[in-house]
Image (spheres, rainbow, N blue to C red):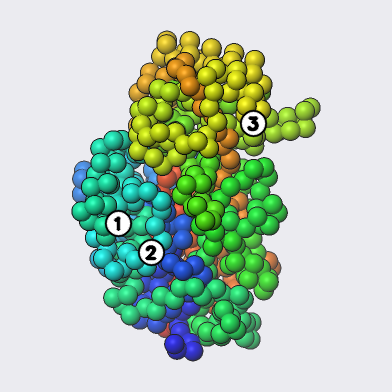
C-alpha cells in the first residue's frame, strides 16, 4: 500500500464512501479505512432513505418544492438548534449532491414517504425522500455488512407497508431464494457506493482501525492505524466513522437515558470524536435531542454476540393491539408517532426523583401476534419464548414488574377508546405520520385476546454530541478556527444543519452532501496551493 494519499477517509459508511468517490472524481487520490471486517457501518443496516428537498426528481414529477419551503421545514424540525450557515449549505447543496452521485452511477428514485411533521411550515407530502431500487450487487455485496432477516433485499418504497406487509416479506423471501445477491435499502445504497469506489481504484481497507491523528506544523497530516502503520494525508483527513452509540463509556458520559441499547454495529464507538478532541477539536451538543427511539434486542439475530437494538417505532408501536406503558402501568404518549415518544422519555419527576417513563414496556395480545410482525419475524410468526406471556393482564404485569392495577385500568380505558375509534388520552393515529401507515381505527385495536405478551423496551438514539464542523465540513478548534486538514462528515459531525429534531433521511442526505462539500473544499485547497 502507498505510504500516503491526498485524502485519508476514516470510516466506510455512506458518508465516507461518498467523500472518497467525490474526491476521486475531483482528481484526488484517496483511501478508505474501515475498522470493521465489512463496509457500511450504520448506513448498511439503515432504511437507505435520503431526505433532499427541492430535488430534480420531484420537479420532474411535477413537484413545486422550493429552497425557502425546505428551509422553513428544517427550522421547525431543528427546534432552535440549527446552525444557519450549515443549514443553508445543506439546503443549497443537497440537490446538487443528488445529481452528482446520480451522474456517478446511482439510480435514485422518489419514495412515497412523507415529511414527519405535516403541521410544520414548509412541510410536504411525498417528494423529498429518495432511495435506490434494489439491485444485484454480486461480489460487491459480499464486502458490505448486512442486517438480519431478508428484508434488506427489497425496500419500503418497493412495497410500502413496512415489516407488517405480508407482500413485502413474500418478495424478500422470493429474492433470497432466486436472487441471493439482491440488495435494497441501506445495504443496497452502500453496495452501489462500494461498486463506484472500486471502479475508481479507491483502496477500501477493512479491519484497519485508526488509533490517532498525526499533526505536522499545525496541520493534520495523516493517521496512525492498526499496528503502528502511518498513512500520510497530503491534503486532508476526513472523519466519517460515525457517532459513539456503541461505546458504553461515551454513552454514559454524554447521554441521560438509562437502559440505553445501541442500534448501530459494535464498531461505532466514537473513535473519530476521541482522536480529534485529543488535538483540540471542538464538540457540539445537540440539545433536546429528539433522535430518540424505543426498541429491543432480538437475541436470535446474534446468537454468538450482541445484536443491535431493533427499532419498534415503525413496526410494533404503530400496530393495532399494542401499547407502551411505564412501571406504573400508564401510557405516556402516542405510540403510532415515534417522535411523540421521545420527549416523554426525557421527562423527569422532580418529586419522585425519577424518570417515570423509563423503563417502559411493549404490551400486546394474541390479535397482534397472529397478524403482525414482531422482532423482525414475518407477520403472524410465533412469538419467541424470550417474550414474557400470561393469560391475564394482571399476571403479565406482575411478571414484568409493572403495577398490576395501573396496567389493568389503562388497558380497560384503551380498549374502550379502541372500540370508539379515538384515543382520548393521546390522539394516537391522528398525526400525518401515523395516517401514512395506518387508519386510526385500526391503529387502536383493543388488547383483549389472551395470551397477553410484554417485553421491556430500551431507549436508543443518535449521539447527542459530535465534532463541531462548519459549512465546509471543516472541524473547528476549541478556539474557533478551522483545523487545517481535518473534516468531519456524517454522524461523526454534530447535526447542526438539522438541529434537535428527527426526520427520516436527514443523516444519509447530510453524509452525501457534506462528503461532496469536503471533497470540493479539499480540491480547491490543492488548487490554491
Earlier-in-chain disc, 3 versus 1: 1
Labels 2 and 1 touching (C-beta < 8 A) = yes
Q: Nearer the viewer, residue 462 or 144?
A: 144
The tag on residue 144 is 2
The tag on residue 357 is 3
Whole-Å distance between the Cαs marked 2 and 3? 37 Å
Q: Residue at x 46, y 57 (%)?
A: 42
Whole-Å distance between the Cαs marked 3 and 1? 38 Å
Earlier-in-chain disc, 2 versus 3: 2
442 horizontally vs 297: left or right: left
Question: Is 143 situated above or below 158?
Answer: below
Q: Residue at x 26, y 57 (%)?
A: 180
Q: Position of residue 337 (x, y in %)?
A: 46, 32
Q: Position of residue 442 (x, y in %)?
A: 37, 21
**Local SS, label 2:** loop
Q: Residue at x 43, y 36 (%)?
A: 374
Question: Is 110 situated above or below 13?
Answer: above
Query: Is the residue marked by circle 1 packed among few (<14), some (14-19), or many (20+) residues within 10 Å?
Result: many
Q: Which residue is mark 1?
A: 183
Q: Quadrant of residue 159?
A: top left
**Local SS, label 3:** loop
Earlier-in-chain disc, 2 versus 1: 2
Q: Quadrant of residue 319?
A: top left
Q: Position of residue 516 (x, y in %)?
A: 40, 67
Amino acid at each position: 500500500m502507498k505510504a500516503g494519499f491526498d485524502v485519508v477517509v476514516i470510516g466506510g459508511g455512506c458518508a465516507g464512501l461518498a467523500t472518497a468517490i467525490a474526491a476521486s472524481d475531483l482528481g484526488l487520490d484517496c483511501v478508505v479505512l474501515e475498522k470493521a471486517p465489512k463496509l457500511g457501518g450504520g448506513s448498511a443496516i439503515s432504511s437507505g432513505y435520503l431526505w433532499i428537498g427541492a430535488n430534480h426528481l420531484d420537479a420532474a414529477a411535477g413537484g413545486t418544492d422550493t429552497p425557502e419551503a425546505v428551509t422553513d421545514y428544517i427550522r421547525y424540525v431543528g427546534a432552535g438548534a440549527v446552525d444557519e450557515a450549515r443549514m443553508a449549505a445543506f439546503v443549497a447543496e443537497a440537490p446538487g449532491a443528488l445529481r452528482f452521485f446520480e451522474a456517478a452511477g446511482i439510480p435514485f428514485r422518489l419514495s412515497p414517504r412523507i415529511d414527519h411533521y405535516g403541521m410544520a411550515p414548509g412541510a410536504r407530502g411525498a417528494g423529498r425522500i429518495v432511495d435506490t431500487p434494489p439491485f444485484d450487487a454480486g461480489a460487491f455485496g459480499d464486502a458490505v455488512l448486512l442486517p438480519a432477516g431478508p428484508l434488506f433485499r427489497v425496500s419500503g418504497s418497493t412495497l410500502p407497508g413496512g415489516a407488517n406487509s405480508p407482500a413485502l416479506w413474500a418478495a424478500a423471501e422470493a429474492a433470497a431464494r432466486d436472487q441471493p445477491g439482491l440488495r435494497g435499502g441501506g445495504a443496497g445504497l452502500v453496495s452501489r457506493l462500494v461498486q463506484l469506489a472500486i471502479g475508481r481504484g479507491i483502496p477500501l481497507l477493512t479491519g484497519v482501525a485508526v488509533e490517532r491523528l498525526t499533526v505536522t506544523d499545525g496541520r493534520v497530516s495523516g493517521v496512525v492505524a492498526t499496528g503502528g502503520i502511518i498513512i500520510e494525508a497530503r491534503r486532508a483527513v476526513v472523519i466519517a466513522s460515525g457517532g459513539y452509540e456503541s461505546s458504553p463509556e461515551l454513552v454514559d458520559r454524554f447521554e441521560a437515558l438509562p437502559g440505553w441499547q445501541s442500534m448501530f454495529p459494535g464498531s461505532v464507538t466514537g473513535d473519530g470524536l476521541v482522536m480529534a478532541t485529543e488535538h483540540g477539536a471542538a464538540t457540539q451538543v445537540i440539545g433536546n435531542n429528539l433522535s430518540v427511539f424505543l426498541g429491543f434486542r432480538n437475541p436470535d439475530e446474534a446468537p454468538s454476540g450482541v445484536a443491535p437494538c431493533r427499532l419498534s417505532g415503525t413496526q410494533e408501536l404503530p400496530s393495532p393491539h399494542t401499547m407502551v406503558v411505564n412501571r406504573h402501568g400508564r401510557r405516556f404518549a402516542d405510540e403510532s408517532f415515534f417522535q411523540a415518544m421521545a420527549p416523554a422519555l426525557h421527562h423527569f419527576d422532580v418529586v419522585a426523583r425519577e424518570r417515570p417513563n423509563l423503563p417502559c414496556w411493549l404490551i400486546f395480545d394474541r390479535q397482534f401476534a397472529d397478524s403482525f410482525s414482531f422482532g423482525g419475524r414475518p407477520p403472524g410468526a410465533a412469538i419467541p419464548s424470550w417474550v414474557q406471556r400470561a393469560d391475564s393482564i394482571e399476571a403479565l404485569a406482575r411478571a414484568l414488574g409493572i403495577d398490576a392495577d395501573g396496567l389493568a385500568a389503562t388497558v380497560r380505558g384503551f380498549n374502550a377508546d379502541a372500540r370508539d375509534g379515538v384515543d382520548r388520552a393521546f390522539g394516537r393515529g391522528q398525526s400525518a405520520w401515523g395516517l401514512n401507515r395506518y387508519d386510526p381505527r385500526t391503529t387502536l385495536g383493543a388488547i383483549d385476546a389472551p395470551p397477553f405478551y410484554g417485553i421491556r423496551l430500551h431507549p436508543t438514539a443518535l449521539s447527542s454530541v459530535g465534532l463541531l464542523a462548519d459549512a465546509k465540513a471543516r472541524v473547528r478548534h476549541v478556539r474557533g478556527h478551522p483545523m487545517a486538514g481535518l473534516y468531519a462528515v456524517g454522524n461523526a459531525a454534530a447535526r447542526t444543519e438539522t438541529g434537535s429534531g428527527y426526520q427520516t433521511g436527514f443523516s444519509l442526505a447530510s453524509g452525501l452532501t457534506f462528503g461532496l462539500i469536503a471533497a470540493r473544499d479539499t480540491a480547491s485547497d490543492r488548487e490554491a496551493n
